[in-house]
Image: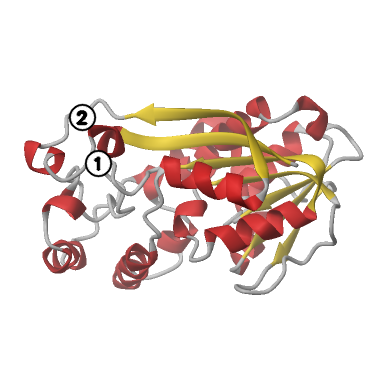
Amino acid sequence: MDAQQARQLDPWFWSHYDNAAGIVVSLVPPGSLQGGRFVVDFGCGDGATALGFATKAQATVIGMDLFRSFDRLPDLARSNLGAQFLPPNLSFRQNTIGAPLPLADGCIDLAYSWSVFEHLADVRGVLSELRRILKPQGALFIQIEPLFHSPYGSHLRRLVDEPWAHLLRSEEEYLALAAGTQDNVPRDEQDVLYRNHAFEDVKRHLIGEYRKLNRISAAGLLDELATAGFSVEWKKLLTTELAPPPALLERFPRDLLVTDQVVVLATRH
């Protein structure tokens, strides 16, 4: 099976292994990619992005997550890449909510996260821990998509494909609509969770995750970074082309509704 066939069979894996990892590698300080440097993928999930990063850099990459979805990465790498072994510069560790990250002070050159920070119950606490493990002037790259107030900020588009439905409907009505959805999830959204559980279980998990979203905004993230002791080197806000409904413009600022992604590079000071 060639790469094109693999991409068609598992677009979720490739969107993270190739696309997400490629974006991160292209935007972080080049020095952090070199041999002898240490990188953390915080909230690495199934590890596909960490694997992509590790194949594009000489640095040692440590994937970290609350759940051990990354244990399935060898099978994903074998089925998509024909790889019998993971690269030697890649390893994984499990962290625990409320406990220090399992790394020493000041040992990491770069930490990055991809669509993770919107799920955190304690953004300030996590930023404090990431600052602790980063070396002085170490870099932190954060990407969040979708932001809560954007068209699909509920993270339930797999269940309800209606822009801003989570803001236009009552929460009870919206979640009832999500719970009643039939299985028509597009292939590029079929992640490890989807492929290893019954659809009804997936729905319950996704709805539970919706309830836990911290609803952070781009401005809120920047404020938290400053409070935690980071200097923002650059930021980029990406917006949707969809026009917010007038009913929502009466309740929320337009910028909040149309900004669906924030990308930030910060350094520890």
Note whether 267 is above or below 128 in the view shown. Answer: above
Nearer to the camera, 172 or 181: 172
Residue designated by label 1: 151
Which of the colour schemes (rainbow, by chain, secondary structure, one colour) is used?
A: secondary structure
x then y, percent, for residue 69: 58, 64
Asked whether, in this view, residue 175 is left or right of residue 261, the answer is left
Residue 163 shows which numbered tag?
Answer: none
Q: Quadrant of the N terminus?
A: top right
- Whole-number angstrom distance, CA of label 2 to CA of label 1: 8 Å
Q: Is residue 143 visible?
A: yes
- Verify CB contact (< 8 Å) between mark 2 and mark 1: yes
- At x 76%, y 57%, the residue is 132
- 2 or 1: tag closer to the N-terminus: 1
Note whether 186 is above or below 124 in the view shown. Answer: above
Which image quadrant is residue 82 in? top right
Q: Secondary structure at mark 1?
A: loop
Q: Quadrant of the C terminus?
A: top right
Nearer to the camera, 222 or 36: 222
Asked whether, in this view, residue 162 is left or right of residue 206, the answer is left
- At x 74%, y 28%, the residue is 29
Which image quadrant is residue 246 in? top left
Q: Is residue 1 visible?
A: no
As drawn, which residue projects farthest toward the right? 36
Q: Secondary structure at mark 2?
A: loop
As drawn, which residue projects farthest toward the front? 227
Amino acid marked by disc 2 = Leu
Amino acid marked by disc 1 = Pro
Q: Residues within 10 Å of mark 1 (few under 14, many from 20)?
A: many
x then y, percent, for residue 97: 60, 73
Which image quadrant is residue 170 in? bottom left
Residue designated by label 2: 242
x then y, percent, for residue 251: 15, 46
